[in-house]
Amino acid sequence: MGTHLKTQKRGRGSPRYRTPGHRYYGHVAYEQKLEGMGQVTALIHDAGRRSLVAELLLDDGKTMFTAIAPEGMRIGDKVHLRTINSYVKPEVFEYDNALVTTGSILPLSMIPDGTAVFNLELRPLDGGKLGRTSGAGVMIVSRDENNGDVNVKLSSKSIKVIDPRCRATIGICAGGGRTEKPFKKAGYKFYAMHARGQQWPKVRGSAMSAYDHPHGGKSMGKPTTIARNAPPGQKVGLIAASRTGRRRGKKIKADVAKK
């Protein structure tokens, strides 16, 4: 008898393949209502994310919440916090240079064009969805004077239209340049991925032995296609594929020549 497939072992939920969520700091998002000033009390390294997490204490001295830290933030810095709770889009964009400081959390209607932001909300009060990874930044490009929507440029160079009531953090997400340093050894990469419950390296089934995988074996082996109603121990590869391989023929060559 062979062994269980890696996908079956991971899906079982045993401690060996379980994500170490007990070491993660938790979900970091904007509060529903943020008003006033906040002071950075701590910068936390979260094992579950690539960027630092900042603990902010509001000016009332009691309320504390967490946010993703920008580059250049230090303990003791003070940031401005604003939220627009109105259901009507603001028609007038009011900019205050005193509020636009690194780390401040403001609606897009209060941030001038050309400012780099991160942890941007897709919809008002959703907590932040865009530009959350280390070194990420979203650029505010322009605005629509008719309906007030804001055009932002993502890291992928694509333009997205965002509601002006959506909030964002001024600056660039902390941890930039992380991918520029090589791992140098496979063991470093393995433990870095293992700390987050990710599978690495991913070995091809055809490179395994027949004992470990249905596609394995040095002889003829088995095809990579599998029936739709195959049992779970065999259902790997191209499931219910009508055809495999590169498309060949005169018609294909003619289409390529036209392009």
Image (cartoon, grey):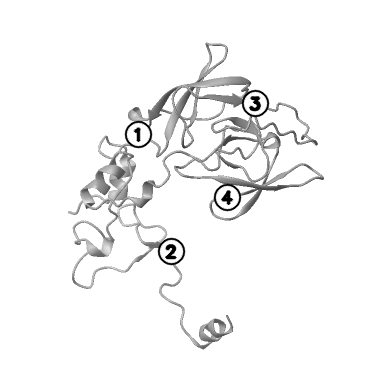
Mark 3–mark 1 distance (CA, rounded to whole Å): 29 Å
Mark 1–mark 2 distance (CA, rounded to whole Å): 40 Å
- Quadrant of res 26: top left
What type is the residue that disc 4 sits on? Leu
Q: Which residue is mark 3?
A: 82
Q: Which residue is mark 4?
A: 154
**Which mark sits nearer the N-terminus, 3 or 1?**
1
**Which mark sits nearer the N-terminus, 1 or 2?**
1
Tell me the crowding category of disc 2: few under 14, some 14 to 19, or many 20 or more residues within 10 angstroms, Cα based: few
Q: Nearer the viewer, mark 1 or mark 4?
A: 4
Foreground pick, 234 / 216: 216
Tell me the crowding category of disc 4: few under 14, some 14 to 19, or many 20 or more residues within 10 angstroms, Cα based: some
Q: Which residue is mark 2?
A: 240
**Which mark sits nearer the N-terminus, 2 or 4?**
4
What type is the residue that disc 3 sits on? Arg
Q: Which residue is mark 1?
A: 47
Q: Secondary structure at mark 1?
A: loop
- Where does the image place residue 62, in percent across and percent down from the top left? 52, 11
Proximity of marks 2 and 4: CB atoms separated by less than 8 Å:
no
Q: Secondary structure at mark 4?
A: loop
Q: How many marks?
A: 4
Please tell me whether residue 104 is drawn above or below residue 254 in the rendered image. Answer: above
Please tell me whether residue 106 is drawn above or below residue 3 in the rendered image. Answer: above
Q: Secondary structure at mark 3?
A: loop
Mark 4–mark 3 distance (CA, rounded to whole Å): 23 Å
What type is the residue that disc 1 sits on? Ala
